[in-house]
Amino acid sequence: KSFFLTTGFSPGALVSPFNFRKSYYSAQMAKRVAVVLAGCGVYDGSEIHEASAVLVHLSRGGATVQMFAPNIEQMHVVNHLKGEPAEEKRNVLVESARLARGNIQDLSKLSVKDHDAVIFPGGFGAAKNLCTWAMQGKDCSVNGEVKAALQAFHGEGKPIGLCCISPVLAAKVFPGCEVTVGIEKDERYPDTSDTAAAINQLGCKHVSKSVTESHVDGKNKLVTTCAFMCNAPIHEIFDGIGSMVQENGGKL
């Protein structure tokens, strides 16, 4: 069964790959998933391709999705053409509405009782707007509404998915948890080693996983994948996020 999408698993799914896929996408697909965005654009908001991949995989599984974002000012605005800061101000919720096609709510309205799981796509916005990791590393603070949402889902034993840099949110909020941000000491993952070291210094455990894989922390019901922490072709990013969404949660 899928960690995020199913509650049942048909014995017939074990007969063949075709039957497995048919069962996966037909068995009890009424799950409600919250997706928390951090703006629009890799350098100052949510990574667009990661957010899209999350939505595609959830849609394919038949989940009901509601997107949220904090109603706060972005840390800063980056000109994505020039790759440098711009002298303007933007709102995280307003910018996230671009990705959500307008169908988005203030994060303050997110209620754990109305959802079965929550997913946080990556992008620098996760490290700049949802927390201050981009500036302070392991000594960062997490936005109060983001922290409250994470704690609420964790407290109810509901799955939490995080990709790219967003697993650092879990590392700050859940001491001793296990996450992945890629493979350490591998040139395809240029920022993984430093990020993993900081995660370990927080008393958590970093688990090396490739870009197409995800890691499940069964105790804390966290599923993480590295996404664009790896310099990989976009289809590999897409597949890794698919693994995060579809991860077998049978032992949990």
Image: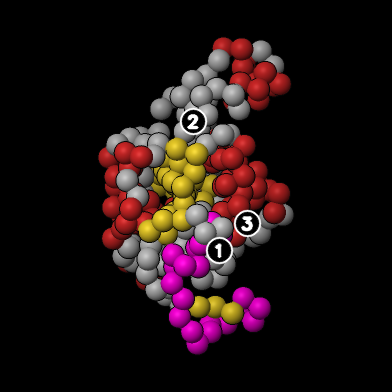
Kind of residue indicated by mark 1: Arg
Residue 72 is covered by the magenta coloring: no
Give the residues drawn in magenta, as a range.
80-100
- Helix, strand or loop at label 3? It is helix
Q: Which quarter of the figure has residue 48?
A: bottom right
User: Residue at 65% of width from left, 22% of height from top?
Assistant: 22
Q: Nearer the viewer, mark 1 or mark 3?
A: 1
Q: Nearer the viewer, mark 2 or mark 3?
A: 2
Residue underneath mark 3: 49
Q: Is residue 228 visible?
A: no
For the residues labelled 1 and 3, the Cα–Cα distance comes to: 13 Å
Kind of residue indicated by mark 3: His
Name above or below for residue 171 compared with residue 87: above
For the residues labelled 2 and 3, the Cα–Cα distance comes to: 25 Å
User: Residue at 29% of width from left, 45% of height from top?
Assistant: 152
Q: Are marks 2 and 3 in contact (CB under 8 Å)?
A: no
N-terminal of the two: label 2 or label 1? 2
User: Residue at 37% of width from left, 36% of height from top?
Assistant: 158
Image coordinates for residue 184, horizontal then vertical, percent: 55, 54
Check disc 1: other Cα within 10 Å, few if <14, some if 14-19, many if 20+: some
